[in-house]
Image (spheres, rainbow, N blue to C red):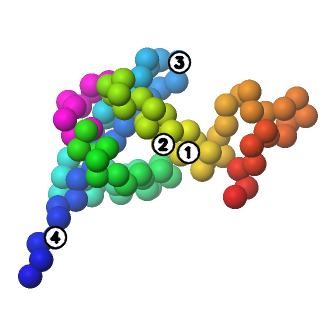
Amino acid sequence: MAKHKELSAAALSFNEGQDAAPHLAAKGSGKLAEDIVDMAKELGIYVHQDETLLRELQRLKEGEEIPPQLFAIIATILAFSYLLQGKTPQGWTRPDGSRAVSTQA
């Protein structure tokens, strides 16, 4: 009988204009991981699944900034999650109000 792998999760936080970089807001396994994922889903926050990235994030302490070597992947994931929510940078909105990128996939 195969063992089921215990669920693990990490949550990131980034306050534009306040934070220099995203930081680890929470991490855990088992019931805590389920709670993190459930809360994200309830809030409409994108839940990304990547075991390699999760292992790197689990090395951090809660509240610790994401290390520079993870900036590119975290920025890509955050940008993707913002697009899914219909959020785009101000520069992507043309003077007529239309968007330079279609969010209607």
**46 relative to 38 in the view: left or right:** right
**Is residue 63 visible in this depiction of the protein?**
yes
Q: Which residue is mark 2?
A: 77
Q: Which residue is mark 3?
A: 17
The magenta stretch spans which residues? 57-65
Q: Position of residue 27 (x, y in %)?
A: 24, 42
- Please, what is the dominant secondary structure of the magenta stretch? loop
Mark-to-mark CA distance, 3 and 1:
19 Å
Nearest to N terminus: mark 3 or mark 1: 3
Q: Position of residue 39 (x, y in %)?
A: 37, 52
> Do residues under tags 1 and 2 come within 8 Å of each other at their CB atoms?
yes
Sort mark 1 into few (<14), some (14-19) or many (20+) by Cα contacts within 10 Å.
some
Q: Which residue is mark 1?
A: 80
In the displayed structure, 52 sits above or below 12; it is below
The C terminus - image quarter: bottom right
Amino acid type assigned to the residue bearing label 3 in the image = Gly
Mark 4 or 3, closer to the camera: 4
Mark-to-mark CA distance, 4 and 3:
41 Å
In what element is the residue under mark 3? loop
Which image quarter: residue 1?
A: bottom left
